[in-house]
Image: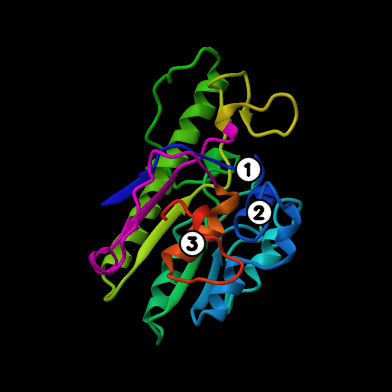
């Protein structure tokens, strides 16, 4: 039921750099475009009711600029105030908020779910019942702490999958047209290429820090009324994702460029 984009990278290996380009008119060629407007502002002007639901804290070295973008939504809800080094709410807290939004009046809604996902410490990102991976994983770095970190990361990914699955189930219950676009702000190195986990902007940067998942789910009503081009094998960088989201929502403006949309 999903269209998987197979060759997608982030413009940066950290949240602010990636999202301050992807969700605004800024991109690799024109970084200052981020001051010209965001996808949320555009959708507001197009008559959508916009929501930003976040399980990441609103203020901090990795968050403040993203919060500025988020505050453009008609409704902004932050469900977490803790640093990722601490125990934080699990991403399932977003689901109740999403359900309540869909019960509200109106049929033109765009909801941004900002998950905490696989932020380190990985083992704090999922409940105990998702502690599935316990065997020795495949890696060239043979140490107990490496095995533990890889397994915890894989558990966090499995948990994220379960949350996305729940969002799909919720969306299937809605009438009319709906779609879900999922992408990560950046990737992680987890003992694949180098003896390191996480992400960094120095000389230790690897391909895995830029490689990200991205996919689109559409309900039957959306598929019936929208013809998207299948560019799933084309190279794409998410500094242009504003144009893809605008395309999916059927919004055109003087500032959007359909040639920068992966679905056009």
Look at mark 2 in the image and give the residue it sits on. 21
| Mark toward the start of the polypeptide (1 vs 3) | 1
Do the residues under discs 2 and 1 have CB atoms within 8 angstroms? yes
* Numbered disc 3: secondary structure: helix
Alpha carbons under labels 1 and 3: distance apart: 17 Å
Decide if residue 86 is in sight here: yes
* Numbered disc 1: secondary structure: loop
Do the residues under discs 1 and 3 have CB atoms within 8 angstroms? no
* Residue 22 appears left or right of 203: left
Seen at 38% across and 45% down, the residue is 231
Look at mark 3 in the image and give the residue it sits on. 245
Do the residues under discs 2 and 3 have CB atoms within 8 angstroms? no
Q: Quadrant of residue 176?
A: bottom left
Write down the region rendered in magenta. 209-237
* Numbered disc 2: secondary structure: helix
The residue nearer to you, when weighing 31 against 202, is 31
Q: Quadrant of the C terminus?
A: bottom left
Q: Position of residue 71 (x, y in %)?
A: 66, 72
Question: Which label belongs to residue 144?
Answer: none
Alpha carbons under labels 2 and 3: distance apart: 13 Å
* Residue 120 appears left or right of 136: right
Seen at 58% across and 79% down, the residue is 74
Look at mark 1 in the image and give the residue it sits on. 11
């Amino acid at each position: 039921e999903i269209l998987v984009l197979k060759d997608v990278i982030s413009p940066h290996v950290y949240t602010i750099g990636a999202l301050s380009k992807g969700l605004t008119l800024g991109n690799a060629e024109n970084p200052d475009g981020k001051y010209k407007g965001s996808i949320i502002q555009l959708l507001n002007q197009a008559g959508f009711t916009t929501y930003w639901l976040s399980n990441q804290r609103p203020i901090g070295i990795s968050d403040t600029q993203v919060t500025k973008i988020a505050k453009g939504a008609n409704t902004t809800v932050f469900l977490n105030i803790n640093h990722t080094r601490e125990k934080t709410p699990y991403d399932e807290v977003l689901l109740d908020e999403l359900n309540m939004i869909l019960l509200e009046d109106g049929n033109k809604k765009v909801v941004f779910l900002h998950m905490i996902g696989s932020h380190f410490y990985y083992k704090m990102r999922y409940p105990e019942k998702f502690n599935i991976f316990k065997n020795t994983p495949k890696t060239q770095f043979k140490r107990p702490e490496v095995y533990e970190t890889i397994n915890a990361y894989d558990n966090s990914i499995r948990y994220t999958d379960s949350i996305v699955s729940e969002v799909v189930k919720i969306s299937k219950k809605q009438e009319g047209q709906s779609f879900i676009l999922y992408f990560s702000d950046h990737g992680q190195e987890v003992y694949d290429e180098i003896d390191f986990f996480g992400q960094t902007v120095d000389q230790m940067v690897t391909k895995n820090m830029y490689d990200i998942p991205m996919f689109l789910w559409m309900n039957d009503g959306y598929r019936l009324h929208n013809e998207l081009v299948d560019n799933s094998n084309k190279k794409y960088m998410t500094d242009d994702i504003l144009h893809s989201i605008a395309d999916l929502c059927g919004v055109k403006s003087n500032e959007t460029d359909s040639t920068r949309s992966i679905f056009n």
